[in-house]
Image (cartoon, helix red, strand yellow):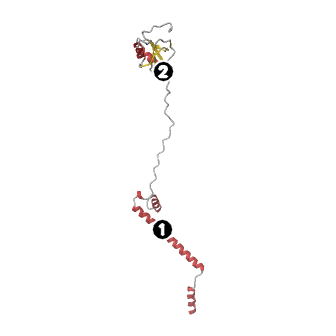
Amino acid sequence: PRNSSAATAAAATAPSSPAAVDASSKARALRSLAASASLRRRAAWCWSRWMLRRFSYSEVTPHNRELAYSNGTTAPPPAPPVPAPAPPATGKTAPAPPEFDHDAHMHASRERHLSSMAGSGVHYERGVWMYGDYKQDVDADTPHACAQACQADEGCLHWNFHVVHHRCDLKGQASGHNSDVPDWISGNSLRYKPGAAEL
């Protein structure tokens, strides 16, 4: 029995094999790494909690806010509202305004001015006296006012009035009358005596 106890003690004090030593070292290293990772996670969680308590929400930097979200210590902000969809197009457009008819406007203006001269006792007719320019663009905005301006001027024998632009021209001894011009009204003063050259 004394020899058996001595053998057991010698086996316990004998050095371990290299494989056993290597496995033991690896186990200790793994336990150390696991403990370090746990400590780092705990430190990060404590630090984020301290930041949220130390500063207001608006003062926390985006980096710290993202860290707090990842640790679950606060809820992320709500998503922005979705804009309402645009109403569907009906396919109906406003009708385009009709194009302005210059000829119709000119004819209507001439007839209106001719009607205004009816019963005035002043000579008037459609058309224009040619040549014999005396005064142009006299201050008169109606054919009746143009006829009065000619009658009041001793040098005027004829007058022409443009029915659209309301232009009054006074004529002296004209060479002839053209009744085919549609946008003018003309007339004679009382002093005018037809001559052979104007007939």
Taking depth in this image into account, of 166 and 48 the one nearest to the observer is 166
- Secondary structure beneath dot 2 equals helix
Q: Amino acid at mark 1?
A: Arg
* Quadrant, the N terminus: bottom right
Q: Dot 2, how many residues are within 10 Å of its Cα: few (below 14), some (14-19), or many (20+)?
A: some
Give the label, 1 or 2, closer to the camera: 2
* Residue 137 quadrant: top left
Residue 109 higher or lower than 46, as above or below = above
Q: Which of 20/112 is in front?
A: 112
Res 52 quadrant in image: bottom left
Amino acid type for the residue under numbered disc 2 = Met
Q: Position of residue 180 (x, y in %)?
A: 52, 15
Gap between marks 1 and 2, in whole Å? 94 Å
Residue receiving disc 1: 40
Q: Which mark is residue 103?
A: none
Where does the image place residue 98, in percent across and percent down from the top left?
A: 49, 28
Q: Is residue 1 visible?
A: no
Q: Are marks 1 and 2 in contact (CB under 8 Å)?
A: no
- Is 185 or 76 nearer to us in this picture? 185
Point out the residue furthest to the top here: 196
Q: Quadrant of residue 146?
A: top left
Q: Position of residue 39 (x, y in %)?
A: 47, 69
Q: Indicate whether 155 appears above or below 26.
A: above
Instruction: Describe the element under mark 1 as helix, strand or loop.
Output: helix
Instruction: Report if residue 43 is visible in the image.
Output: yes
Image x and y of residue 91, in percent:
51, 36
* Residue 51 vertical placement versus 177 (above, below): below
Q: Residue at x 48, y 67 (%)?
A: 41
Residue, disc 2: 106
Identify the residue at image location x=44%, y=65%: 47
Residue in the picture at 39% in, 62% down: 54
